[in-house]
């Protein structure tokens, strides 16, 4: 036996994969208006307020105070829709400041940095001594291999597979 569903707005027949019939969905979309996206407080502003206790305006002020650049890599912080995940400006905060709390209230925020830079800091445990050892390790390896550091553009995707390992295991 096949059961049919009905639209919660008008009671008309409803396709199995829809929440509203086409007419009601179109009516609701028109009711939101053309400026819905412009005035809607999206997930980013909600996350900033909920997690860090700051507004998008405060976020922008922090970026301006940094000169528009990431303090970790020194490159410009891009803004806009459709940015790759690793390029997006992200709040960098100290997790030790407010352990176990959902909201830090903004007192733990160190700055605004690229998501890629933020992940790198987090992977190294937010420990300046580990950062220094990692930097020295890379410096020595570059000297031993006779290579210079590659200045990869920020818009280059992170390297994942097919990394060419040259002279790593040469005797």
Image: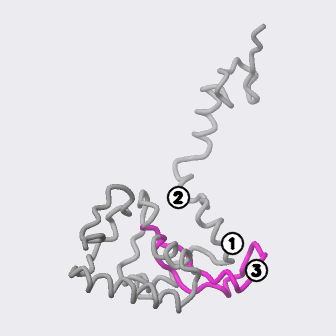
Rendered position, 26 above or below 81: above
Q: Residue 6: x, y in percent?
A: 75, 21
Name the residue furthest front.
171
Give the camera-side residue of 145 and 135.
145
Q: State the quadrant of the C terminus.
A: bottom left
Q: Is residue 94 left or right of residue 118?
A: right
Residue placed furthest toward the top: 1
State the SS at label 2: helix
Separation of marks 1 and 3 at Cα, in angstroms: 13 Å
Q: Quadrant of residue 144?
A: bottom left
**Which residues make up the magenta segment?**
87-115
The mark closer to the camera, 2 or 3, is 3
Q: Badge 2, how many Cα within 10 Å: few under 14, some, many 20+?
A: few
Q: Is residue 74 left or right of residue 171?
A: right
Q: Is residue 78 above or below residue 25?
A: below
Which label's residue is closer to the chain start, 1 or 3?
1
How far apart marks 2 and 3 lie (CA) works out to 35 Å
For the residue labelled by badge 1, is the local secondary structure a helix, a strand or a loop?
helix
Which dot, 1 or 3, sits closer to the camera?
A: 3
Q: Which residue is mark 3?
A: 99
Using the image, tell me which numbered label, if any, was put on residue 38. 2
Give the residue drawn at x 57%, y 73%: 56
Identify the residue at the far left of this view: 146
Asked if residue 114 lies in the magenta stretch, the reply is yes
Residue 143 picture quarter: bottom left
Give how far across and how far down residue 11 sits, in percent.
Answer: 76, 22
Q: Which residue is mark 1?
A: 51
Residue at 65% across / 21% down in the picture? Answer: 15
Residue 156, x across and y down, in percent: 32, 64
x then y, percent, for residue 51? 69, 72
Circle 3: is it few (<14), some (14-19), or many (20+) Cα within 10 Å?
few
């Amino acid at each position: 036996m096949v059961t049919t569903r009905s639209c919660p707005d008008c009671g008309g027949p409803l396709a199995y994969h829809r929440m509203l019939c086409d007419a009601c969905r179109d009516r609701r979309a028109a009711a939101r208006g053309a400026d819905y996206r412009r005035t809607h407080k999206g997930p980013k502003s909600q996350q900033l307020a909920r997690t860090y206790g700051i507004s998008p305006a405060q976020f922008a002020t922090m970026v301006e105070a940094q000169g528009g650049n990431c303090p970790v890599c020194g490159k410009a912080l891009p803004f806009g829709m459709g940015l790759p995940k690793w390029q997006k400006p992200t709040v960098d905060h100290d997790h030790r400041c407010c352990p176990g709390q959902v909201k830090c209230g903004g007192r733990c925020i160190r700055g605004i940095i690229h998501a890629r830079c933020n992940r790198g800091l987090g992977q190294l445990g937010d420990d300046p001594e580990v950062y220094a050892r990692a930097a020295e390790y890379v410096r020595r390896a570059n000297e031993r291999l006779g290579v210079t550091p590659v200045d990869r553009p920020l818009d280059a995707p992170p390297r994942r597979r097919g990394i060419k390992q040259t002279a790593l295991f040469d005797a």
